[in-house]
Amino acid sequence: MSSSRVTAMSELLCLRDVCKTYVSGGTRLEVLKDVSLKVGEREIVAVVGARYEGKTTLTQIAAGMQRPDRGEVWFRGRELSGLSDGTRERLLGLETAWVDRNGPGLRLTVRDYVGLPLAMGHRHGKREVRKLAYEALERVGASDCARQPWEDTSRWQRVLVGLARGIACRPRLLVIDDLLDALGVRRTRQAGELLRSAVDDLGCGLLMSVSDFEAALVADRVWSFERGGLKLMSDQIAGEADVIDIEGVRQGRDRAP
Amino acid sequence: MRPYIIAVFDYDLATMASSRTGDVSASKVILGLMIRQPDTGAGVGLRLNSRFPHARWSRNAVHNNLPGLVRRGYLRILREGAEPSLSLYEATREGVDHFGEWLREPSHAPLALRDALRAKLELCERGDLPAVIVAIREERLTCDQEYAAAHARYKQAERLERLGTGHDSDWTAKLQSALVADEALLWGQWAKRLQRLQEYCEELVQDVEQPGDRDV
């Protein structure tokens, strides 16, 4: 992307021709091939893919947790690969949240787990962190498990806790990795409604990877993995931002064999 | 005797078609639409195509089925029109009961796997595979378009549902939303299925062209 490229006011994240290959024991596994997508404010973008198709890699690159081998990752008009690790982490720690289905890895109460990113990134006091974490849990309807250890929560509670953790720091960009998998109709719909209302209220953008088309229904734009690349399946976002980056969308569409 | 034989034949067509292949006959759907609202042949034809846009009913579906439904006593003519398609019909008590029975009965069979693509793959020779891959790709593109259209309808239904009034009409909106979601899922999953099939066939072609060159 050239520096003179017009960036829409609403555009938060833009991935352009991102590639990622893992090398292990002499074997090369090309996970992402020339992946391009964008997420704007108040937009929900879903990427549908099966296991090992590169969903986690894509979401981690989008959230700045991994660097791509090639390609560009723009966040609010800044190209992230040009930033130092510290600057990138600071910027992303304040403005993005990444959520997956895995827990804290150590024994924490739900409230402390939800508050962890707040304590680390925003340097809030302990009392304020707990208050904000509790508010986020209340917002998703999971305040009743605030004092429970995360390990003792149910599958559905973990989804809610993950969502609460994502929105607790009021991010500009929320990135969710495979959290809404195999929830069933009612729960998937409920989670979708929570996400939609969070995105509308916070004015943030949401990029989520999902395993099936059911979880993707809530999205405004749906992409599907295809041999490491992305294929645009549906685009329900009308407006200026699409006109500006329609070339990128076309490239994504044309990349399908 | 002749009308009696025709009536039995019509009845068999309407019921057996659904039990053998898992799909539904046009006659059953027309009856259901007439129960919801008395209509002319032309009117029910429009509703048949708008409510079931992917069913690919024949052009004469309404014209062919209305006389049979009247003959079996499931519909009656309320008012004769200047031409047959303008006559106004309504469902009879027998029609409502018959439809209710069908609604409650369990489905006998899942959808028949009888698509042309499957038959082509089953019967193609090795040299035909590249051409079949092109056919798969084209069918995928159609599925992608249908998914996008269904997703658009889902988003529209979602917006309408969010504006819901809490009245009875919301129930219909919710049901519509669930049906459109189901449709989007079907197209999405069908597109994914074709993607897998295409990838498999392409690998097969490579294996045939370059035996031994591939890492397995």
Image (cartoon, grey):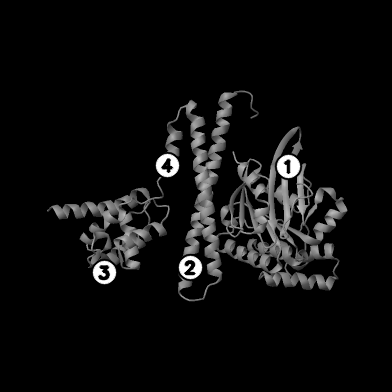
Chain under label 3?
B
What residue would you read off at disc 2? B173
Position of A197 with respect to B161 (left or right) is: right
Nearest to the observer: residue B142 or residue B6? B142
Give how far apart the Cα atoms at labels 1 and 4 are. Answer: 37 Å
- Residue corresponding to mark 1: A19
Callout 1 and callout 4 share a chain: no
Mark 1 to mark 2: distance in Å? Answer: 43 Å
Q: How crowded is mark 3: few (under 14 residues within 10 Å), some or many (20 or more)?
A: few
Question: Which residue matches tag 4?
Answer: B115
Where's residue B131, x and y in %? 49, 31
Real-space CA distance between mark 1 and mark 3, rounded to the nearest whole angstrom: 65 Å
Q: Which residue lies furthest to the left in this view?
A: B1
Give the image location of residue B82, x and y in percent: 23, 63
Name the residue rendered at 86%, 66% in the picture: A123
Q: Mark 4 lies on which chain?
A: B
Image mark for residue A186: none
- The image quadrant where one finds the C terminus of chain A is top right
Q: Along the line of sight, which residue is nearer the eye, B161 or A26?
A: B161
The amino acid type found where label 3 is placed reads Arg
